[in-house]
Structure formats: C-alpha cells, structure tokens
Amino acid sequence: MKVVLVSLMLLLAFIAIDCSESSEEEKTDEDDEMQEISSDYLNWKLEQPKDSDTSFEKFIESSSTKIEKMSLSDNRYTVYVQTGDRKHAGTNAKVRIQLFGSKGESSERTLNTWRDDFKKGKTDTFHFYNRDVGVISKIRIGHDNTGVSPGWFLDKVTVHDSGNNKNYVFHCYQWLSSKDSKKQVFKELSAS
C-alpha cells in the first residue's frame, strides 16, 4: 500500500509540473484521470476541518475514491462553467454543483482546482465520477458565500456525460449573490 501511495504522490507531482508545459492536444486520458484525482484530493482537503489530518495518505484511507473503488456503473462527468464577462463577475467562494437526472441525483460536488477558478469572462473545466444519474434534467449550482468577493455572475454551465456522450446546457445569466435583490447564492437550472 505504501508503494502505491508513494507512486501516486510522485505521479501527481509529475503531472502538476508536466501539465503546465503541455498543450491540451497532448493530454491523455491517463493525464486527465490523475488531474481528477488531484482535484478530488484538493476538494476533499477544502472540506475538512482546519485542525484535521489532510495528508494524501489520509485521503486515500478515508475516501471512496475512484483510485480503489470506482464502480463499472460510474460515469465520467465533465462540467464547463462559464463566468460572465461583467465587472466583478468572478468569485473566490467555494462553488458546488449537484446533478439531477432520470435515474437519480449525484452527490454535491465542490468545483475547485489548484488554478484560480471562476474569473470574469472565463470558462473553467472540472471532471468527476459518479454513478449514472440518467438523462440530466436540472442542476443545482451555487457557492458558500465565503471569501473577499463571493458574489458571482454565472452565464451558463455545460455538463458532458461520457456514459451517453451527450451535452446538457444550463443557462443562468444571473448573479448568485447575497447582496443582489434576489439574495440567492444557489440556483436550480433546467436543461435547455
């Protein structure tokens, strides 16, 4: 087990360095999977209490990650989040999403990476595995209203389901902010 952990940690370090030097065209599925594991670890770490053990080893021990337990019925979901191109549109709050489909719903996922996510006019990409939720009819997306500038103008979200190779688009074009007139930091969006 220690050999596997050391190998995974070395791979994660190599990919973090290598990804900054390689183009999108050169990436492989293996690179994507290692980035997902890195992203899952960072998301898990952000959700832990401040005084808890957040070592990579603890993550492997305590989680049901795809490293050991990915089920054959799990689908890979790729989420593209487009922040609006308006003044102060970006957020530094923790953004979360949940998918709802004909076969059920996903767990709520934190969408954060090691990059500076959710900036004005940018589209951010996230990957995760979840059991198949079927045809996606709606999502619930929002943030925890923390940070210096939590208000966020969300243009749209596109979810790609690798299980059926379909894209689902969810238009928002609204502020998710406790300071605007609607005072909503989470929103349910139906597929268009």
Image (cartoon, helix red, strand yellow):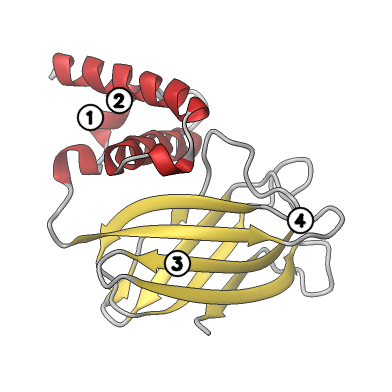
Q: Residues within 10 Å of mark 2 (few under 14, many from 20)?
A: few
**Nearer the observer, disc 1 or disc 3?**
3
Amino acid at pointer 1: Glu
Could you tell me how far apart the alpha carbons at marks 1 and 3 are, in whole angstroms?
Answer: 30 Å
The label shown at residue 61 is 1
Residue reaching furthest front? 25
Q: Which residue is mark 2?
A: 58
The residue beneath circle 3 is 159
Q: Please report contact status of discs 1 and 2: CB closer than 8 Å, yes or no.
A: yes
Residue 129: x %, y % from top left:
30, 54
Instruction: Give the camera-side residue of 22 and 5.
Output: 22
Query: Given this view, does label 4 or label 2 mark the residue nearer the observer?
Result: 4
- Disc 3 vs disc 4: which is toward the camera? 3
Measured as percent of width and height from the top left, residue 108 is found at 42, 58
Spatial separation of the CA atoms under disc 3 and disc 4: 23 Å
Residue 64 visible in the current orientation: no
State the SS at label 4.
loop
Q: Secondary structure at mark 2?
A: helix
Q: Of tags 1 and 4, which is closer to the observer?
A: 4
95 to 41, vertically: above or below: below
| Left or right of residue 63, residue 180 in this image | right
Q: Residue at x 76, y 69 (%)?
A: 183
Residue flagged by tag 2: what amino acid is it? Lys
View extreme (right): residue: 87
Instruction: Give the mark nearer the N terminus: 1 vs 4.
Output: 1
Q: Residues within 10 Å of mark 4 (few under 14, many from 20)?
A: many
Tell me the residue at 44%/54% (across/down): 109
